Image: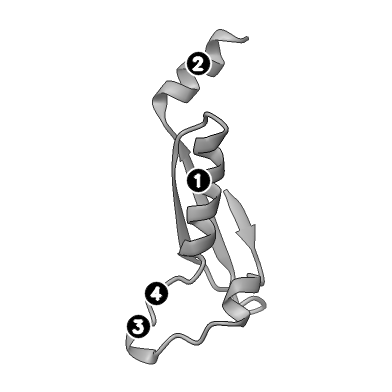
Amino acid sequence: MIIDNDPTITRHISVPRDMSQLSCSSFTAGIVEAVLDGLGFPARVTAHNTPTDQHPSRTTILIKLEKSVLEREELFK
C-alpha cells in the first residue's frame, strides 16, 4: 500500500458533487500499475479514498501483485 495524505493531483481537479465517489487518484494508480508492469511485476493497482479528520483528501493506493510474480520471487530465496 502507498498512502498519500495530500495527493497533489486532487489539488488541481474539481469533482462535481454528484460524482463524489470518483477518485482522481485512480490516474496515479494507473501510472503505478503501468510502471510495475513495465518492470516485469504485473499487478492490479487501485486507489481508495480513505479520509481522516486531519487529512480529508487522504488516498490509499492498493497494490496486488499477480500470483506469478510471488512465485517467481520465491525462487530467488
Q: How far apart are marks 4 and 2 (CA)?
A: 35 Å
Q: Earlier in the sequence, mark 4 or mark 1?
A: 4
User: Which dot, 4 or 1, sits closer to the camera?
Assistant: 1
Q: Earlier in the sequence, mark 3 or mark 1?
A: 3
Quarter location, residue 20: bottom left
Residue at the disc numbered 1: 34
Residue 59 as seen in the image, left or right of residue 15: right
Q: Where is residue 38 in the image (x, y as percent from the top left)?
A: 53, 36
Residue at the disc numbered 3: 19
Residue at the disc numbered 4: 22
The residue under label 2 is which amino acid type? Arg
Circles 4, 3 touching at the beta carbon (< 8 Å): yes
- Position of 75 relative to 63 (above/below): above
Q: Distance between the residues labelled 2 and 3?
A: 40 Å
Q: Distance between the residues labelled 4 and 1?
A: 20 Å
Q: Is residue 34 visible?
A: yes
Q: In which quarter of the image is the C terminus?
A: top right
Q: Which SS class for mark 2?
A: helix
Q: Distance between the residues labelled 4 and 3?
A: 6 Å
> Which residue is most to the bottom?
17
Q: Residue at x 54, y 8 (%)?
A: 75
Q: Nearer the viewer, residue 26 or 71?
A: 26
The residue under label 1 is which amino acid type? Ala
Q: Where is residue 18 in the image (x, y as percent from the top left)?
A: 32, 88
Residue at the disc numbered 2: 72
